[in-house]
């Protein structure tokens, strides 16, 4: 894993690397140890968690929330 992460970092230096570990019985501490050892940025224990981390990393939710707040403020002012 560490070798793969190192190669990815060389090819895509600005990328956020998420390590996926699809094991049902793993503690959050063990996941963090795996992430640290592999030198990845984030770690996920399920596909759903990986998708959530991807969405958070892109900031799409933040943009949606900001747009919603602006619409609310515009409605309150009008």
Image (spheres, helix red, strand yellow):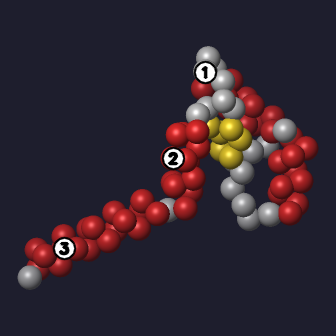
Left-right relation of 68 to 4: left
**Residue mark closest to the camera, 3 vs 1:** 1
Determine the CA span between mark 3 and mark 2: 28 Å
Residue 24: image tag: 1
Q: Which residue is mark 3?
A: 73
Position in image of residue 10 (x %, y %): 88, 60
Dot 1, crowdedness within 10 Å: few (<14), some or many (≥20)?
few
The one of 50 and 77 positioned closer to us in this rendering: 50
Position in image of residue 57 (x %, y %): 56, 56
Position in image of residue 74 (x %, y %): 17, 78
Q: For the residue labelled by badge 1, is the local secondary structure a helix, a strand or a loop? A: loop
Determine the residue positioned at 91% across, 44% down: 3
Determine the residue positioned at 54% across, 39% down: 49
Dot 2, crowdedness within 10 Å: few (<14), some or many (≥20)?
few
Against 18, residue 61 (above or below) is: below
Against 75, residue 39 (above or below) is: above
Determine the CA span between mark 3 and mark 1: 44 Å
Q: For the residue labelled by badge 2, is the local secondary structure a helix, a strand or a loop? A: helix
Choose top left, top right, bottom left or bottom right for residue 71.
Answer: bottom left
Determine the residue positioned at 71% across, 41% down: 19
Choose top left, top right, bottom left or bottom right for residue 63.
Answer: bottom left
Determine the residue positioned at 74% across, 65% down: 14
Determine the CA span between mark 2 and mark 1: 18 Å
Q: Which residue is mark 2?
A: 52
Dot 3, crowdedness within 10 Å: few (<14), some or many (≥20)?
few
């Amino acid at each position: 894993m560490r070798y793969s992460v190192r190669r990815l970092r060389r090819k895509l230096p600005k990328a956020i690397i998420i390590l996926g570990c699809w094991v049902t019985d793993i503690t959050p501490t063990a996941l963090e140890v795996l992430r640290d050892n592999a030198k990845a940025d984030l770690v996920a224990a399920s596909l759903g968690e990986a998708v959530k981390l991807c969405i958070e990393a892109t900031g799409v939710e933040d943009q949606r929330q900001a747009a919603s707040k602006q619409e609310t403020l515009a409605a309150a002012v009008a």
